[in-house]
């Protein structure tokens, strides 16, 4: 199955439907005018035109409806055609994709395909989008918008530094200790309701932009900082560097230079 082929057919059906609808509207306006002026000759003619246009509209509507009902969205998902075409569109647009059906990571988004509801979730937002090309463009536009958004690296770094100090205090650790970034997130955003506004995906995106800035940024008190890896990738946060290459950041530490 291929939605683009279906889309092309429906576009033609929609054009005929629109033409018939315009003809009905035109005939109706002529009818109203003739009725108002008492122009019996044109009144009869416009009614005949409206009848003919209505017949064409009914035919166009029936054809479009039959075509729409003939496309099995659930089978489109189940066959794997949707996922295959979505990944092809992502590749065409340069979107980095990791994962396997039905869940993919398209940094910084988590994309899930739901066969039962025939919906796609991008993080927490659901889209009734069965057109792979459209979904890929939504993801690409979102990524481009995030990349264009201003980012104050020093301010974010100082917020991380404050959260790190709080984590040390709560966990009974000493300065220079590596703290897992996913643990630090809970100290950075302690309120559960605030995590809806600033979720892990947004956090990962900011970490990626900080990572791209390098480790020479000044921090409070002139401390240095460094990211650390982990053998357990489930504890790491996947980011893309400025070259589009994936990196796995697991921990961060702040220390006196």
Image (spheres, grey):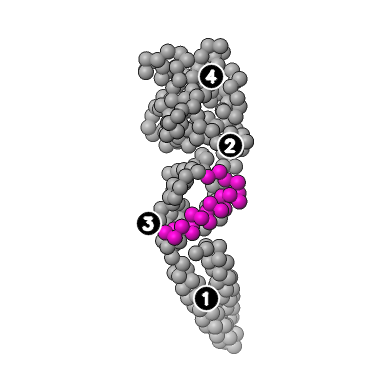
Report the residue at 47% width, 44% height from top. 99
Distance between mark 3 and mark 1 Cα atoms: 30 Å
Pointer 3 residue: 116
Please give the range of residues in magenta. Answer: 77-97
- The nearer-to-camera label among 1 and 4 is 4
Separation of disc 4 and disc 3 at Cα? 46 Å
Secondary element type, mark 2: loop
The mark that comes first in sequence, 2 or 1, is: 1
From the viewer's side, name the closer residue of 135 and 232.
Answer: 232
| Mark 2 / mark 3, whichever is N-terminal | 3
Checking the image for residue 225, the label placed there is 4
Give the secondary structure at mark 1.
helix
Viewport quadrant of the C terminus: top right
How far apart, in angstroms, are the residues tagged by discs 2 and 1?
A: 50 Å
The residue depicted at 40 percent of the width and 15 percent of the height is 173
- How many other residues sit within 10 Å of disc 1, few (<14), some (14-19) or many (≥20)? many
Residue at 55% x, 71% y is 13
> Which type of secondary structure does the marked residue at label 4 adopt?
strand
Q: Main secondary structure of the magenta part?
A: helix
Mark 4 vs 2, N-terminal side? 4
Q: Where is residue 241, by image quadrant? A: top right
Q: Is residue 101 above or below residue 227?
A: below
Say which residue label 1 marks: 60
* Residue 68: x %, y % from top left: 47, 68
Please state the horizontal and vertical placement of residue 243, each as a whole percent of the image. Answer: 62, 36
Q: Eyeballing the image, is 183 above or below 126?
A: above
């Amino acid at each position: 199955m291929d939605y683009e082929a279906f889309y092309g057919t429906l576009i033609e059906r929609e054009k005929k439907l629109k033409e018939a609808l315009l003809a009905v509207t035109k005939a109706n306006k002529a009818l109203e005018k003739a009725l108002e002026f008492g122009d019996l000759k044109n009144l009869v003619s416009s009614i005949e035109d409206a009848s003919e246009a209505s017949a064409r509209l009914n035919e166009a509507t029936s054809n479009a409806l039959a075509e729409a009902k003939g496309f099995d969205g659930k089978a489109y998902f189940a066959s794997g055609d949707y996922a295959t075409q979505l990944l092809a569109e992502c590749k065409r647009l340069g979107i980095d994709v990791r994962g396997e059906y039905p869940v993919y990571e398209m940094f910084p988004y988590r994309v899930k395909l739901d066969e039962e509801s025939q919906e796609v979730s991008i993080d927490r937002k659901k889209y009734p989008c069965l057109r792979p090309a459209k979904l890929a463009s939504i993801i690409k536009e979102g990524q481009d918008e995030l990349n264009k958004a201003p980012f104050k690296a020093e301010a974010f770094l100082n917020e991380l530094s404050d959260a790190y100090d709080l984590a040390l205090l709560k966990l009974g650790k000493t300065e220079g200790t590596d703290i897992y970034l996913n643990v630090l997130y809970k100290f950075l955003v302690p309120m559960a309701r605030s995590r809806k506004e600033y979720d892990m995906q947004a956090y990962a995106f900011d970490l990626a932009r900080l990572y791209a800035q390098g480790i020479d940024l000044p921090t409070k008190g002139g401390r240095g900082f460094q990211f650390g890896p982990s053998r357990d990738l489930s504890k790491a946060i996947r980011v893309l560097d400025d070259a589009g290459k994936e990196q796995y950041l697991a921990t961060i530490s702040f220390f006196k230079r």
